[in-house]
Amino acid sequence: MEFIPVLLKEMEKENVTTREMLSRIPDTIYDWQPHPKSMTVRSLATHLAELPSWVDMVLNTDGLDFATMPYNPPVVNHTADILNIYDKSYEAGHSALAKADPAILEKTWTLSNGDKVLAADNKLETLRMVYCQIVHHRAQMGVFLRLNNVPIPPSYGPSADEGSL
């Protein structure tokens, strides 16, 4: 089975829902968080917007060490900025995947924090984890929006806000 066409199709389908979810964030709630241990809307939106670029990173590196590459996200205050970050991130990930040699999917990619290995999987498995992270954080954003009375877009069928089948 050729995995790259399948991964591309999945990425394209998830793109529609993820971009729509991000587009619904009101500029007025970026500092809101549902619990002190939760991310703010700003942090969650930025992370979700940047995740598609991880496809490019996974395909073109051997791993990521948080100890040597600290995360410094851009500070955003407007949904237009989040969508700009997301569009660039999606394009980078999609383009890298479209050009990828299928053999690269068998190579190991390691996520670590200094000497602590957090994950060491082949690149195919890692890409699936990236996709799962996108869906996971998109669902979190849906809860954040719901708690702020923002209508939720449909994902895999209609939402309570978009009508029934």
Image (cartoon, helix red, strand yellow):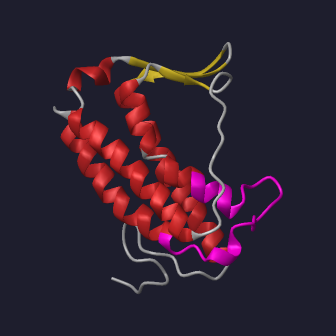
Image-quadrant location for residue 33? bottom right
Q: Tell me if 165 is positioned left or right of 57 in this view.
A: left
Magenta residue span = 23-46
Q: Which residue lies furthest to the right in this view?
A: 36
* Whether residue 23 is situated above or below residue 45 in the rendered picture: below
Q: Nearer the viewer, residue 20 or 143?
A: 20
* Whether residue 81 is situated above or below residue 27 in the rendered picture: above
Q: How many labels does the image show?
A: 0
Residue drawn at point x = 38 percent, y = 85 percent: 164
* Whether residue 42 is situated above or below residue 50 in the rendered picture: below
Which quadrant: the C terminus?
Answer: bottom left
Image-quadrant location for residue 76? bottom right
Point out residue 106 in the picture as x, y percentages from the top left corner. Answer: 31, 19
Residue drawn at point x = 60 percent, y = 69 percent: 78
Which quadrant: the N terminus?
Answer: top left
Residue drawn at point x = 28 percent, y = 21 percent: 104
- Whether residue 37 appears in magenta in the rendering, the answer is yes
Point out residue 17 in the picture as x, y percentages from the top left corner. Answer: 40, 65
Q: Tell me if 26 is positioned left or right of 161 in this view.
A: right
Image-quadrant location for residue 95? top left
- Whether residue 123 appears in magenta in the rendering, the answer is no
Q: Tell me if 100 is positioned left or right of 25 in this view.
A: left
Q: Tell me if 145 is positioned left or right of 13 in this view.
A: right
Point out residue 59 in the picture as x, y percentages from the top left corner. Answer: 36, 28
Point out residue 79 in the picture as x, y percentages from the top left corner. Answer: 55, 69
